[in-house]
Image: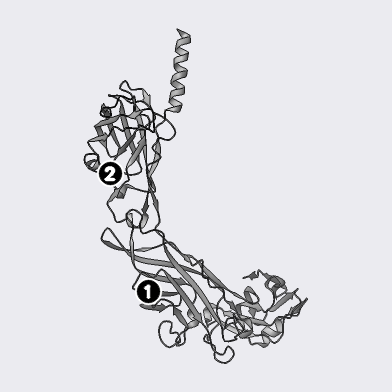
């Protein structure tokens, strides 16, 4: 008896490992995150299961849904599968199957096999192995498709198939009984266009930092370009959105572009700030530039053109700051006949402006009676470097930062004391300042200290 029981268990184990229903052929629907946010209904593809066991009347099958709530009104009352004549392709024909609904809820639906039918006039053996059950099939009642509550879908939804015999023994189990039903993805992505470029101008310290270094053989060709793109991944996704209008915003310090300090806001000269694609409105602010398009403009090119005589008539009348740029893209789109607006993503990197030299910040230095400042520039490179100093006055007597070109260079492979040159330039009072040297950044170091009544204070300088 024991031997027979062990044999029966071995057969059962072997059968369960082989007989595994496969639900993975169910099509996964990609859902637009943006569009689905204003939808209420999700429509699934057919939930398709390839059976791998012999089913009989009384067996029970269950579909369990996780990640989205099922609309129970869309669930068919029965599933009807036609018998199939496999003559010429298989030694067995497929049983037809009728499954009647037992129960349903927002996360499951259960059916019982109520009838098996054979192919008319067929004398061949029949099987349910490799027969296909489709939940949501158009032949079901009511007709396809299954529907879900769109508001309940987060990142994805899955469906799990399970079956038991009439006496509650597991049937047709395996590793392929779970599959994704919906996968949520962002339909839109904003970034610097891979086919273009980010801001990367070099500010020219030889022109008091009011111009860029020319980018070509033409000295007047002093421009920087930023290419932005809104990617619409796939408008054919489920619950997809349709873009109507787009606006691009670039964040940075653009106060230097102001050509009329007497007028509120930033007033730019003609053709200094231009966008491709005919925007309906361009706004230049001290901290941003915005281009608005009345159409679905998916790419744009922002050009900053500082053309002009860099020495006699620069576009900028103040120092152009070194800085990092970020950008955002906002789109108005329609989904489910509802118009809405969305910032496509958070700020993303849009480039930087650097110097053709080194910039070292000295946070404090007193140029007044009773104090003895000492400022030295170490230059280990093989080239002399002109020195510019941008001075920031104490806030109790605020004035705009002022630029000075010193009379002495940073000597190559030497240390240069610039204290006298700073005094001779007319720097007075308690100040902070940037020391800008037209020499390789990694080869420049600055030491700054002062004495007062025999005490020494050493400043921590910062290289930018």
Q: How is the image coloured?
A: one colour
Counting other residues with Cα less than 10 Å from the Cα at mark 2, is it few (<14), some (14-19), or many (20 or more)?
A: many
Name the residue at 62% across, 73% down.
361
Give the image quarter of residue 52. Answer: top left
Q: Residue furthest top?
A: 1
- As drawn, 370 above or below 151: below
User: In the image shown, does 382 or 360 lie closer to the viewer?
Assistant: 382
Q: Nearer the viewer, mark 2 or mark 1?
A: 2
**Drawn side of residue 313 relative to residue 371, left or right:** left
Residue at label 2? 146
Residue linked to disc 1: 292
Residue 406 in the image: x percent, y percent? Answer: 67, 85
Viewport quadrant of the N terminus: top left
Q: Is residue 150 above or below residue 257?
A: above
Q: Secondary structure at mark 1?
A: strand
| Residue 205 sits in quarter | bottom right
| Mark 1, other Cα within 10 Å: few <14 / some 14–19 / many ≥20 | many
Q: Percent x, y for residue 452? A: 69, 75
Q: Nearer the viewer, residue 208 or 47?
A: 47
Give the camera-side residue of 410 and 453.
Answer: 410
Mark 2 or 1 closer to N-term? Answer: 2
């Amino acid at each position: 008896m024991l031997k027979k029981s062990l044999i029966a268990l071995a057969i059962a184990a072997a059968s369960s490992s082989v007989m595994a229903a496969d639900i993975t052929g169910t099509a996964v629907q990609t859902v637009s995150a943006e569009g689905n946010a204003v939808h209420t209904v999700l429509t699934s593809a057919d939930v398709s299961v390839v059976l791998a066991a012999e089913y009989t009347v009384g067996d029970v099958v269950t579909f369990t849904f996780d990640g989205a709530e099922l609309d129970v009104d869309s669930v068919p009352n029965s599933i009807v599968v036609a018998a199939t004549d496999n003559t010429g392709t298989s030694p067995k024909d497929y049983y037809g199957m009728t499954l009647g609904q037992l129960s349903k809820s927002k996360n499951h639906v259960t059916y019982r096999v109520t009838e098996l039918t054979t192919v008319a006039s067929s004398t061949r053996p029949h099987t349910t192995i490799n027969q296909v059950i489709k939940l949501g099939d158009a032949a079901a009642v009511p007709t396809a498709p299954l529907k879900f509550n769109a508001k309940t879908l987060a990142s994805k939804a899955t469906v799990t198939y399970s079956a038991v015999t009439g006496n509650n023994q597991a049937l047709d189990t395996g590793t392929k009984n779970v599959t994704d039903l919906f996968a949520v993805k962002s339909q839109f992505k904003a970034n610097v266009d891979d086919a273009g470029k980010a801001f990367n101008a070099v500010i020219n310290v030889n022109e008091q930092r009011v111009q860029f270094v020319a980018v070509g053989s033409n000295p007047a060709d002093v421009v920087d370009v930023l290419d932005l793109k809104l990617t619409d991944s796939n408008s054919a996704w489920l619950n997809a959105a349709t873009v109507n209008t787009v606006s691009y915003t670039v964040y940075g310090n653009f106060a230097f572009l102001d050509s009329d300090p007497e007028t509120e806001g930033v007033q730019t000269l003609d053709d200094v700030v231009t966008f491709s694609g005919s925007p309906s409105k361009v706004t230049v602010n001290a901290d941003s530039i915005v281009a608005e398009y009345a159409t679905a403009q998916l790419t744009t090119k922002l050009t900053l053109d500082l053309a002009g005589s860099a020495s006699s008539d620069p576009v900028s009348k103040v120092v152009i700051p070194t800085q990092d740029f970020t950008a955002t893209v906002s789109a108005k789109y329609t989904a489910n006949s509802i118009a809405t607006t969305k910032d496509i993503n958070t700020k993303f990197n849009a480039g930087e402006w650097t110097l053709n030299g080194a910039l070292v910040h000295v946070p404090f230095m007193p140029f007044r009676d009773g104090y003895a400042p000492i400022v030295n520039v170490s230059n280990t490179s093989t080239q002399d470097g002109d020195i510019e100093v941008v001075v920031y006055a104490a806030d109790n007597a605020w004035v705009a930062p002022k630029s000075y070109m010193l009379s002495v260079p940073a000597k190559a492979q030497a240390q240069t004391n610039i204290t006298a040159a700073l005094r001779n330039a007319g720097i007075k009072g308690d100040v902070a300042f940037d020391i800008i040297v037209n020499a390789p950044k990694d080869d420049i170091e600055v030491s700054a200290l002062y004495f007062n009544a025999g005490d020494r204070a050493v400043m921590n300088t910062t290289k930018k």
